[in-house]
């Protein structure tokens, strides 16, 4: 299985976490989490997966040296390819898709910032692509969600039993996802995940059970939560 890791963001919402680590703000994937950069944890899970055989990381040139040092330090057995990221996550994935070898029929896309995903989740996701063309890992929503209008008043309360919180990995047939990305570019669709492009094109996207601990590290609070989850897992 081919894995693409979007890692080309700048971690704007993580700003203050760098202060506590006494460093100037950089890509949040370089932040320390229990002695390793965030990206290292993501890569270790991919390395331990039984199904992933090829890894592509989309990054910004400013981070290449650091990313290469991380990959080198982990002594990975799987090939890792560095791919130029884009101005948006959508563009980064588009670049990643174009860098896949011709032989790639299916691909998993997994945010570098979801550094607590387990190898078992990767393998369950790879398995899912044997019986569908598109899936997202997701978990049932626990909160009651409100749709709110521009004046701050609630418009509606969707039935929670139908709501799922989307995570990554997300996985797709490579030719179909390429087509959806091309369609998205032609029509100026701006989306925050790849499933949304698949949906917009009228293609079915299956749900695969995600993991409650598979949070996306977005704010300094997420970093603190990730640390406590990892501690409980390791010690
Ligand atoms: N990402 C990317 N290319 C971009 C923007 C984001 O590959 N141009 C990646 C991030 O590196 C991250 C994932 O997409 O692994 C999810 O994005 P997000 O959590 O929003 O990360 P950032 O964009 O870095 O954070 P922020 O939005 O707070 O600036
Ligand atoms: Mg972002």
Image: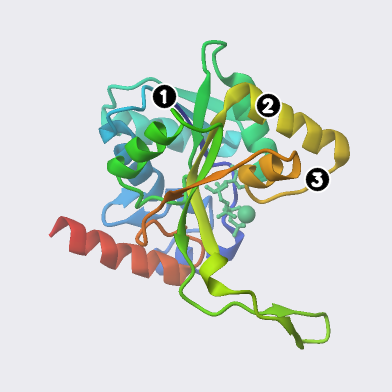
Q: Residue at x 64, y 44 (%)?
A: 89
Circle 1 sits in a helix, a strand or a loop, which is it?
loop
Q: Which mark is residue 193?
A: none
Which of the labelled discs sits on residue 189, or is there none?
A: 3
Q: Is residue 99 visible?
A: yes
Q: Earlier in the sequence, mark 2 or mark 1?
A: 1
Which is more toward the observer, 9 or 127?
A: 127
Mark pair 2, 1: CA separation: 17 Å
Q: Residue at point 67% right, 40% down? A: 198
For residue 43, say whether it is visible: no
Q: Which residue is mark 2?
A: 178
The residue labelled by disc 1 is 1
Q: What x and y, as percent, mark residue 224? A: 36, 69
Residue at disc 1, CB closer than 8 Å to ligand 1: no
Answer left or right for 179 relative to 117. Answer: right
Left/right of residue 138 with respect to residue 200 in the rendered view: left
**Badge 2 density bin: few <14, some 14–19, many ≥20, Cα 10 Å:** some
- Which residue reaches farthest right? 187
Q: Residues within 10 Å of mark 3 (few under 14, many from 20)?
A: few
Q: Residue at x 41, y 69 (%)?
A: 20
Mark 1 surroundings: few (<14), some (14-19) or many (≥20) residues within 10 A: some
Q: Are marks 2 and 1 in contact (CB under 8 Å)?
A: no
| Quarter of the figure that contains the C terminus | bottom left
CB contact under 8 Å: marks 3 and 1 = no
Looking at the image, residue 198 sits to the left or right of residue 56; the answer is: right
Relative to 163, is 128 above or below? above
Q: Position of residue 24 (x, y in %)?
A: 51, 58
Residue at image x 36%, y 27%?
Answer: 52
Q: Earlier in the sequence, mark 3 or mark 2?
A: 2
At mark 2, the secondary structure is: helix
The image shows residue 135, relative to residue 57, as above or below, that is below
The CA span between labels 3 and 2 is 14 Å
């Amino acid at each position: 299985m081919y894995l693409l890791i979007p890692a080309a963001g700048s971690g704007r919402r993580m700003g203050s976490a760098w202060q506590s680590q006494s460093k100037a703000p950089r890509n949040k994937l370089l932040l320390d989490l229990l002695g390793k950069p965030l990206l290292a944890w993501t890569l270790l899970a991919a390395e331990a997966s039984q199904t992933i055989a090829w890894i592509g990381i989309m990054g910004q040139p400013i981070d290449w040296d650091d990313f290469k040092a991380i990959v080198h330090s982990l002594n990975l057995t799987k090939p890792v390819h560095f791919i130029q990221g884009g101005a948006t996550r959508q563009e980064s994935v588009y670049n990643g898709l174009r860098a896949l070898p011709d032989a790639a029929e299916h691909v998993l896309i997994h945010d570098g910032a979801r550094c607590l995903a387990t190898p078992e989740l990767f393998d369950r996701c790879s398995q899912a692509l044997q019986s569908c063309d598109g899936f997202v890992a997701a978990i049932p929503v626990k909160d009651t969600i409100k749709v709110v209008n521009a004046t701050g008043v609630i418009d509606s309360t969707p039935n929670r039993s139908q709501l799922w919180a989307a995570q990554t990995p997300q996985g797709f047939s490579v030719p179909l996802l390429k087509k959806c990305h091309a369609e998205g570019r032609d029509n100026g669709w701006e989306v925050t995940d790849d499933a949304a492009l698949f949906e917009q094109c009228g293609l079915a996207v299956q749900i695969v059970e995600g993991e409650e601990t598979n949070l996306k590290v977005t704010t300094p609070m997420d970093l603190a939560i990730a640390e406590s989850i990892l501690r409980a897992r390791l010690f």
